[in-house]
Amino acid sequence: MSNNIKRVIALITEAICVGTYTTIVYAVLTSFIHIRNEYSQLLIIGFFKHFFARFLGIHKVYCEYKRGTNANASFGRKDHVFKLFQYIFNKKNIVLESVCEGLAFLFLGLILIRSFNLRGHMLYFCIGFLLHLGAEIAGLHTAFCATY
């Protein structure tokens, strides 16, 4: 099997794991708090998904995995975008990062709700899955892990 096929399989496997983790965060948070406004819910789930991953050490494990597999070369890295994200992440500002992820959840979630009428667990799985793919392709994870 070629290296590109292995990278794609690894990326899809990672995205499935992130989608599953996102669904778990959604299920746990919504079992404790009821958020009626779907816009607020998207923001809150996105925020806490990122916040909990940092707090639980998931980010550290992911970055160590990426370094160990030498998989940090992103698919479509653009140096100016890479430098911008590296600047943001270099500040180690968990709140800013979590707010950005919450906004990404809001943006993608509204598209998925309006285009495909997704709701609940499937919505949050798809958001986690697609955001992971997008961040990997854009080089966001490379910039994040370079400063971790």
Image (tube, rainbow, N blue to C red):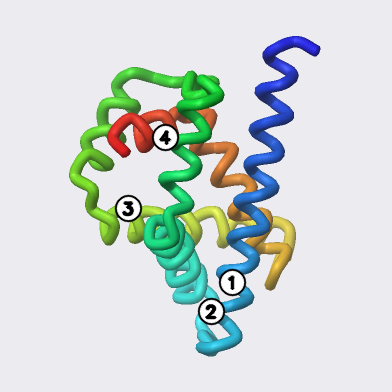
As measured in the structure, the alpha-carbon distance from the residue carrying label 3 to the one carrying label 1 is: 18 Å
Q: Report the residue at 23% width, 53% height from top.
A: 93
Does residue 14 sit above or below 28 in this rendering? above
Q: Which is more N-terminal, label 3 or label 4?
A: 3
Report the quarter where the N terminus lies: top right
Alpha-carbon span between mark 4 and mark 1:
23 Å
Return the residue at label 4: 140
From the image, tell me which residue sits under label 1: 26
Q: Of the two numbered discs 4 and 2 on the same chain, state the one appearing first in sequence.
A: 2
Specify the amino acid type for callout 3: Glu
Query: How far, Cα to Cα, is label 4 from label 2?
Result: 26 Å
**Residue 129 x/y as whole percent:** 64, 48
Alpha-carbon distance for marks 3 and 2? 19 Å
- The residue furthest right is 1
Q: Residue at x 48, y 44 (%)?
A: 61
Residue shown at the point (54%, 37%) measured from the top left? 134
Marks 1 and 2 sit apart, C-alpha to C-alpha, by 5 Å
Neighbor class of circle 1 (other Cα within 10 Å; few <14, some 14-19, many 20+) is many
Q: Residues within 10 Å of mark 3 (few under 14, many from 20)?
A: some
The reply to whether dot 4 and dot 2 touch (C-beta < 8 Å) is no
Q: Earlier in the sequence, mark 3 or mark 2?
A: 2
- Image mark for residue 29: 2
Badge 2, how many Cα within 10 Å: few under 14, some, many 20+?
some
Three-letter residue code for mark 1: Tyr
Q: Amino acid at mark 4?
A: Leu
Q: Secondary structure at mark 1?
A: helix
Q: Is residue 17 left or right of residue 103?
A: right
Pointer 4 with pointer 1, Cβ within 8 A: no
Q: Which residue is mark 3?
A: 97
* CB-based contact (under 8 Å), mark 1 and mark 2: yes
Q: Is residue 132 above or below residue 95?
A: above
